[in-house]
Amino acid sequence: MTADTGPDTRSLKPVSVDIAVVGAGPAGLFAAYYAGLRGLRVALLDSLPHPGGQVAALYPEKRIHDIAGLPAVHGRELIDNLLLQVAPFEPEWLLGHTAVSLNRSANGGGWVIGTDQGGDVRCGAVVVTGGVGSFTPRRLPAGDSYEGRGVTYHVARLADHRGQDVVVVGGGDSAVDWALALEPLARSVTLVHRTDRFRAQAHSVDLLRRSSVEVVTGAQVTACHGVERLSAVDVTVTGSEGSPERRDCQAMIAALGFTARLGPIGQWGMALVGNRILVGTDMQTDVPGVFAAGDIATYPGRVPLIAVGFGEAATAVNNAVARVRPDLGAVPGHSSDAVMPPAPQPVPALAAAS
């Protein structure tokens, strides 16, 4: 299994496990691994048809620099490694399933998650790792008519932009990272940002300033041109009375961020702060037996990093273990003492898709 593929798991049969992990992004995959490491059966649900969450869907080629022990790793590689890590424990995969409802089981000792495919997942505890929930890119009105014809909201494959004139719009981490990643491949890279203040990491902005990327601040892309595909854009300096500057451009990446919503999870009765689920130090919500980890969780002082999400996932799972299997407790032994099961054979559906 890789970040690009996933098993066909649209089964309507009920699934019974110890822990259900809702969200198959980085935090969810690590949570499933840790549950397996503690000897529990686990199910992974995600509305996307493939594992990896937002990283696999939007940033597979992005280099990630803030995970301990990995000086730099592409998003796709990170997800592939997480899949290799969880594979020996053979979780129940329910990809393409949106978790819709959460109800107490008939005996009151666990939970039943209903999905939009009609199947139920019965479990002793729930760990919600749904990232930012469902997400949609913030639109760039000037590029609407060229979406899919040169205008995109993320970079699926860096190599697709080799030899092109590329305009990146935005001032956050994604915009700066894409501009730097495209610099060695593209014929030219221009970054357009509406202010001179960047929201990206200071080190990344410093690299940007020292690169060959042309940085245009205090400006916006106000029009796109081309016949079949994008061939040029107009860049207008904010407040200027002069004519826009037309620039050759075969690709424009509008990295303006995303809007997110929790969807049905927001109706499960957990305390919320905005679009985030409030948790305690054990990563448990105010609904006993329901935990949250990763960017969908919040508490005072939380820092939204993948590295932080990994630690939260381990904390959530170990405390969930204590509820489902009190004899095991919340404190695991040394992982080096664990007896790892052999890696399973490839899933037929995956082998066919590879």
Image (cartoon, rainbow, N blue to C red):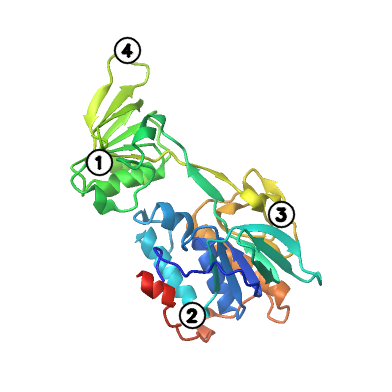
**Image quarter in which the N terminus is found:** bottom left
Label 4 and label 2: CA atoms lie apart by 63 Å
Residue at the extreme right of the image, as rendered: 107
Label 4 and label 1: CA atoms lie apart by 30 Å
Question: Residue 82: x, y in percent?
Answer: 45, 69
Q: Residues within 10 Å of mark 3 (few under 14, many from 20)?
A: few
- Mark 1 highlights which residue? 210
**Image quarter in which the C terminus is found:** bottom left
- Mark 3 highlights which residue? 268
The amino acid sitting under disc 2 is Pro
The amino acid sitting under disc 3 is Trp
- Mark 4 highlights which residue? 241
Q: Residues within 10 Å of mark 1 (few under 14, many from 20)?
A: few
Left or right: where 181 falls relative to 141: left
Is residue 236 among what the camera can see? yes
Mark before the other along the chain sequence, 4 or 1: 1
Q: Residue at x 39, y 45 (%)?
A: 174
Label 2 and label 1: CA atoms lie apart by 45 Å
Judged by depth in the image, the label closer to the viewer, 4 or 3, is: 3
Mark before the other along the chain sequence, 4 or 2: 2
- Mark 2 highlights which residue? 88
Label 4 and label 3: CA atoms lie apart by 52 Å
| Closer-to-camera residue (345/39) | 345
